[in-house]
Image: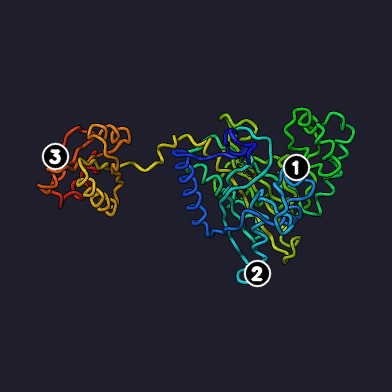
Amino acid sequence: MSENVGVKLLAVKGMNDVLPPDSAKWAAIERCARAVFHAHGYRELRTPIVEYTPLFVRSIGEATDVVEKEMYTFTDRGDRMITLRPEGTASAVRALLEHGELARDPVVRWYYAGPMFRHERAQRGRYRQFYQLGVEAFGVGEPTIDAEQIAMLVEIFTSLGIGGLETLVNSVGGAEDRPRYRAALVAHLEPRRDALCPDCQRRLGTNPLRVLDCKSPSCQTQVADAPSILDHLGDAARAHLDGVRAGLNALGVAHRVEPRLVRGLDYYTGTTFEVRVTGGDLGAQNTLGAGGRYDALVAELGGPATPAIGFAFGMERVALTMPAPATEFEPKLDVYLAAHGAAARLACLGAARELRAAGLVAEMEHRAVSLKAQFKRADRLGARAVVVIGDTELAEGVIVLRDMQAGTQERVPRAELVAATQQLRERV
Ligand code: AMP
């Protein structure tokens, strides 16, 4: 388009490239999470990145921030309303029902990983495209699975070396408890309407529970002495929350009940939870992972009554919080192959392939540059060893193997290339 000539091409605001070495850290986080998911019997679900818009409107809720103002929605060429997924649960429920999974097995455990999209105010730890990993378990209503999922989240973060974690649990009650609490909360907030932020003044009529976790200081003051949901839970919700806590205690997961923890999506029933990191520089974005029960959603979307629970955590926040530097997760270069001359370069191709077949990380120099430049590069890349091949070596059937740590080198018969390089790698 001609009007764009000369305009610098940039990524869309709030959407980030992930370059090396950060991408290696992301891969390590994903490996860790997958190992924990697999160990708990969760299997991978992959769904499309777009869905028909009504799926999200019906599941997340019309009066939520996500649906009201954050979805990337457009009409496709067939005039259908399409939305870039803002979260993973709705698609999981849609797939569960579309493929009749519950008929095959009354208990379905899935995990997913991928980008999500919300048009939020972009800041550190909050982006418009972000990467979530999450789990969903369908068909289990017992509180032990709630405790197990919370413990999974804590296990993932802990094994990634993240300290200072805080686990918060709450219950937002069932369909029978919520209206009573909602009425009590509105009665408390209505006389203070003028002190609430404009968003919460509106929420008072649509979704008053959301006022509880509004970040605006004036709203926080107004809810400080608001009635607690815990005083409005019926016997079933109360017993369930006690069961979750007993499970967490059995698993040794330190936690705290936070009655103001309501989460931003309408589908939650009963248990809600968050794992936050204290300290650090994420500010209000310190919730690493969160989730809860959504026992009514499967039926609301047309399926059989099916209890369900899930969580998701954000890759970006976890990567920002993890203490280890990203470079630690990059593969170490075992051997760099330096060639002197075109014939030697051809010989390096095969030699490098042999080394890789033996499990070594090997990189060869393809450019016709001086040996000095090649050693400089090997050094910069942190290669453990350098193999040098030139015309003399080719003629004699040997290679030169240099130990980059010790600064020594030896001539080794070509046939012993792999064994000698492996030996050197093992040497401390
Ligand atoms: P939610 O889906 O809103 O319950 O969020 C679950 C987790 O996803 C949060 O704890 C964050 O780690 C992550 N997350 C949610 N929204 C964003 C965002 N806009 N940018 C980055 N991470 C996010």
In front: label 3 or label 2: 3
Instruction: Give the mark nearest the N terminus, 2 or 1.
Output: 1
| Residue at image mark 2 | 100
| Residue at image mark 3 | 410
Q: Are marks 3 and 2 in contact (CB under 8 Å)?
A: no
Circle 1 SS class: helix
Picture coordinates of residue 85, whole percent (x, y): 66, 51
Q: Quadrant of the C terminus?
A: top left
Note whether 39 is above or below 219 in the view shown. below
Q: Is residue 305 left or right of residue 414?
A: right
Residue farthest along the right direction in this orientation: 191
| Residue at image mark 1 | 69
Picture coordinates of residue 219, whole percent (x, y): 78, 31
Residue farthest along the bottom direction in this orientation: 103
The CA distance from mark 2 to mark 1 is 32 Å
Amino acid type assigned to the residue bearing label 1 in the image: Lys
The CA distance from mark 3 to mark 2 is 65 Å
Q: Are marks 2 and 1 in contact (CB under 8 Å)?
A: no
Q: In the image, what residue occupies the spot 15% across and 49% down?
A: 414
Q: Are marks 3 and 1 in contact (CB under 8 Å)?
A: no
Q: Quadrant of the N terminus?
A: top right
Amino acid type assigned to the residue bearing label 3 in the image: Glu
Looking at the rendering, the quadrant in which ligand 1 lies is: top right
Q: Nearer the viewer, residue 385 or 11?
A: 11
Picture coordinates of residue 162, whole percent (x, y): 51, 37
